[in-house]
Image (cartoon, rainbow, N blue to C red):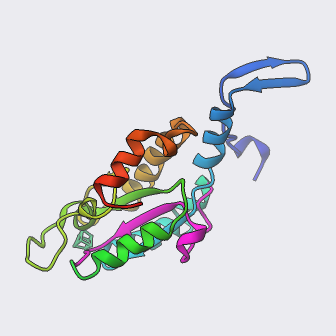
Amino acid sequence: MSDSNINMVAPPEGVVGEGFFATKLNDVVGLARANSLWPLPFATSCCGIEFMATMASHYDLARFGSERVSFSPRQADMLMVMGTISKKMAPILRQVYEQMSEPRWVIAVGACACSGGIFDTYSVLQGIDKVIPVDVYVPGCPPRPEQIVDGVMKLQELVRNESVRRRSSPEYQELLASYNIK
Ligand code: SF4
């Protein structure tokens, strides 16, 4: 691949001079976090197959710095929930979320994770936001890999613009408290 085909991430706004570049810490941290989101795939059914396609060579999620899939919550910061979540499974999903260290973000992939999908039954959780906070919802049954990539890009936008102080803000603590998460 020639150099002309390589897209570099644009630097944050700042002051540029000969031999120096000055910007805000918030912007640099946001840029680094947004381009190194490590996914934890919590895949329970069909939508998981779409995620596999998203990771494979054609869609290649690695382009976004997310090639390092983690099956350990402690080494992941982007929880991707894909598939039907039964009420029995909900406490396990919540435990996985709690084991992730801050900062952590959540994408609900597909109708089942977003709202229970077609399974409006006694045994299926009607959306993962009943047990954990969600940052991005990706609709579809199943969503195509393009939609999953779009969801990741939406999350990157959120992460890039998030204040480094947000996690210790009263609003965020209040959000966690509303889920009874410490
Ligand atoms: S949203 Fe559709 S494709 Fe995805 S897990 Fe549910 S039933 Fe399967």
Which quarter of the figure is the C terminus placed in? bottom left
Viewer-side residue, 105 vs 45? 105
Instruction: Give residue 35's position: percent from left, percent from top.
Output: 62, 49
Tell me how many marks there are: 0
Q: Outermost residue toward the bottom?
A: 88
Q: Outermost residue toward the right?
A: 19
Viewer can see residue 159: yes
Placement of 38 over or under 72, stated as above or below: above
Residue 69 falls left or right of residue 7: left
Q: Outermost residue toward the left?
A: 121
User: In the image, is residue 62 part of the stretch drawn in magenta?
Assistant: no
Residue 72 falls left or right of residue 123: right
Residue 101 falls left or right of residue 10: left
Placement of 14 over or under 48, stated as above or below: above
Instruction: Give residue 85's position: percent from left, percent from top.
Output: 26, 75
Q: Residue at x 63, y 33 (%)?
A: 27
Task: Give the image quarter of residue 88.
Answer: bottom left
Q: Quadrant of ligand 1?
A: bottom left
Viewer-side residue, 13 vs 139? 13
Instruction: Give residue 173's position: percent from left, percent from top.
Output: 41, 47
Q: Residue at x 63, y 56 (%)?
A: 65
Q: Residue at x 61, y 48 (%)?
A: 33
Viewer-side residue, 96 vs 68? 96
User: In the image, is residue 75 part of the stretch drawn in magenta?
Assistant: yes
Instruction: Give residue 102's position: percent from left, percent from top.
Output: 54, 56
The part of the chain drawn in magenta is: 65-86
Viewer can see residue 69: no
Q: Main secondary structure of the magenta part?
A: loop
Q: Residue at x 21, y 77 (%)?
A: 87
Residue 147 falls left or right of residue 19: left
